[in-house]
Every structure is written in C-alpha cells, then in structure tokens.
Image (tube, helix red, strand yellow):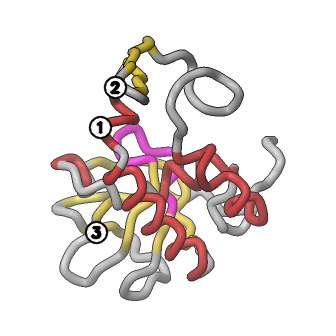
Amino acid sequence: MLQEIMEYIHNYFVPISAKEVTYTISGGAISPAFDAEEGDRFLVCGSRRNDGVYTFHANGIKNDDDTEAAGLRDETFAGTIRVCSVPPALLTLSGEISQWVESNSAQLNSPMQSESFNGYSYTLKSGNGGSGGSGPLTWRDQFGKSLERWRRPFV
C-alpha cells in the first residue's frame, strides 16, 4: 500500500539526484551494499524485475504488499537505490488506509451499488468510482485531503 500511496502523491521522499551504479541482487541480498538501517524503506529504479519500494530487514528485504513476489528477484542491473525518508505520520496513515481498504474491500470490489429503505431496495451498476463519479468511495477519496500535505506536482 505504501508504494501505491507514494505513486498517488508523486513523492518517494528520496534525494532528487542519484548516481547510477551496477547492482547485483542474489538470494535477496544486494551488492554493492547501500546505506540502510533496519526498517528503512528504499526505492529501486532502473531494474527490469525489482523496481519499487522495499523495506530493509537484516533477515530479508520485503516489499510492503505481502505477496509471493514481495521479495527481491535475482538480477544484475544499472540503476539507483535510494533510501526513502518517509515521515512517521505517513507510515501511520498508510496503516490506516490499509485497514480502511481491508474493511471496505467487498464494497470496493463490487460492480454493484445498492440501497434499501422503508421496505424498498434497488441496485445499480457502479460507475467510475467516487471523485465525482457514481461508484463507491475509494481510499483516494477518503484520505486524499490527509495526503495533500505530502503531494508533489507531477513532473
């Protein structure tokens, strides 16, 4: 979820400039080593198989989406790896967004919208989502204002 939020706000909290280096990923380890500490998030760019945001742990690097493909895949590439200086408040909000998405997943994944009152009910096919459309509210609609302070213009 954190990577999706970072994409939405156009902000990875990394230095703008970075020197391209040839990295080798093998067995979940990256060489040459880069300056990361336990729990740091980092952004991989220029990789064919591993672009994205990961969390550094001494016992293994993981993506935050908890899927089978969440770990690093073996490869050698010329690119950048930059440690993200993610504000703690954004990490907390990311957790809240994940919980909101999980508790609203049935409605978010449903193509139908229904209401009932006074013994009358109806069901409509959903449109393009919240944001002025006729579909269900999305996490972007629900948390957009809270994320606004970190949002950067798209470049």
Give the image location of residue 106, x and y in percent: 29, 37
Q: Earlier in the sequence, mark 1 or mark 3?
A: 3
For disc 3, the neighbor class at 10 Å (few under 14, some 14 to 19, many from 20) is: many
Residue at 45%, 79% (x, y): give it: 40
**What residue is pinned by disc 1?**
106
* Front in this rendered view, residue 115 or 103: 115
The kind of secondary structure element at disc 1 is: helix
Disc number for residue 110: 2
Q: Residue furthest top?
A: 125
Q: Nearer the viewer, mark 2 or mark 3?
A: 2
Q: Which residues are magenta?
A: 43-51
Give the image location of residue 47, x and y in percent: 44, 45
Amino acid type of the residue that numbered disc 1 sits on in the rendered structure: Ala
Residue at 40%, 35% (x, y): give it: 108
Give the image location of residue 100, x and y in percent: 42, 56
Q: Are marks 2 and 1 in contact (CB under 8 Å)?
A: yes
Residue 50 painted magenta: yes
